[in-house]
Amino acid sequence: MMTFFPIPYEDELLYSILARYHIRSGNISIKATLDDVYSKRSVSAVMDLPSHIERIIKNMPIGSRYTCNELIDKHTLYSFYSAFLPKERADKIREYMKRDRGSSINNKTGVMASSIKLNQYFKFCPKCVEEDIQRYGETYWHRVHQIVGVLICPKHKTLLYDSKVPIKGFNKHEFKAATVKECKVNRNKNTYSDDVLEKLYNLALDIQYILEYRFNNKPTKWFKEQYLTKLKEHGLANITGRIKQKELLENFVDYYGDKFLKLVQSDIDIHSNYNWLTELVRNNKKTSHPIRHLLLIRFLGISIHDLFNQKFEYEPFGQGPWPCLNPAANHYLQNIIKNVDIKYSADSKSPQGIFKCSYGFVYMRNGSNRIIEDSLSFPIFFRRQ
């Protein structure tokens, strides 16, 4: 049992908290620390999705108010890896993290099946290290810095550096603390163009947002449908749901650039029949790495909050009501039409809207002209029923 527990710092990994405990406990052997923390000497030191958390809570000092869920949500990478998983799978991962089921966790996240490789070393931001020491007298491992794809600190907009501490060390049971000695700046750091830096910064911000705000989990189908709606709006899928894969891939690569996509391990061969983006937008139950969801979300111009909380509707002609275009009527140009019948025009390869007012006047609009000025500038066909 622990006689004390270090106060967790903002965005600190549970791994880092336990590393600080080991130092302050005065224990010479890591086995003694494992006894204190877990009452079990075989537990591995895991950076991202640790298990045996119920044991930590049971061994907390008397009067401690920490809970399993608090440690999981605020001090592990659970929020990131579970964000785009169905509720059943996300709940299973949480359960495994609480219990002695560490070997089952990665299979549930789907990360092991991804082509994205984990970082080899703990990362740090030099400015964060300075601020930590000024504020706390020591530094620590920040959660957001350890996520694959985060190459820039979202707080300071500065490049991250590899520390000397491997994520998988020689002793799999040892918790290694962040120290000034271990966090030396490598002056041979790569440099990137302003465009790439801005994209890396935006991705880091999106990852931080996913980490900090818990959203209700949605089924895989939810995201597929949300993306398809936005692809239709961008003209990258037709009204029947057929995705224009070649155009999507070309536009996506053009938007991000090859160099950036390689940096975040998400490059695409547009000439290949198989790639991660094609799989992500297909109507199947396969899960994708959270990084790749975030890349598609920003490409489509979607708010992360809206993606989870607002069901998108395909509205190629905007939201109703729509105007009646009968020049002989006294309600001409007034928004009185409440419904539109949307079809797909094989000739124009665009949506076709049929608008009918309550007085029987019908007109048709081709394309995705959303405002009344567009309606008047495009060919319109009238008839009375």
Image (cartoon, rainbow, N blue to C red):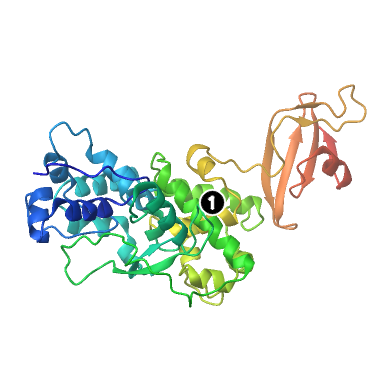
Question: In the visual, does 243 lie left or right of 115?
Answer: right
For the point 12% across and 44% down, the residue is: 2
Look at mark 1 in the image and give the residue it sits on: 227
User: Residue 215: in sight, yes or no?
Assistant: yes
Residue 24: percent from the left, percent from the top?
18, 51
210 on left or right of 20: right
Give the residue at x 82% y 30%: 324
| Residue neighbourhood size for the residue with mark 1, other residues' Cα within 10 Å, grouped as few (<14), some (14–19), many (≥20) | many
In the picture, measured across the screen, residue 230 lies left or right of residue 46, that is right
Closest to the observer, 53 or 26: 26
Q: Quadrant of residue 315?
A: top right
Q: What residue do we see at 83% from left, 44% from top?
A: 374
Q: Amino acid at mark 1?
A: Tyr
Q: Position of residue 144 (x, y in %)?
A: 41, 54
The quadrant where residue 165 appears? bottom left
Q: How many numbered discs, if any?
A: 1
Relative to residue 53, is residue 170 depicted above or below? below
Q: Nearer the viewer, residue 264 or 125?
A: 125
Q: Is residue 307 above or below residue 34?
A: above
Which quadrant holds the N terminus?
top left
Q: Residue 116: in sight, yes or no? A: no
For the point 7% across and 56% down, the residue is 32
Could you say where residue 80 lies in the image, as x and y percent from the top left?
38, 51
| Residue 164, horizontal then vertical, whole percent | 32, 71
Give the residue at the far right of this rendering: 328
Indicate the secondary structure of the residue bearing disc 1: helix
> Could you say which is closer to the camera, residue 15 or residue 238?
15
| Quadrant placement of the C terminus | top right
Using the image as rendered, state which of residue 136 and residue 313 is in the foreground: 136
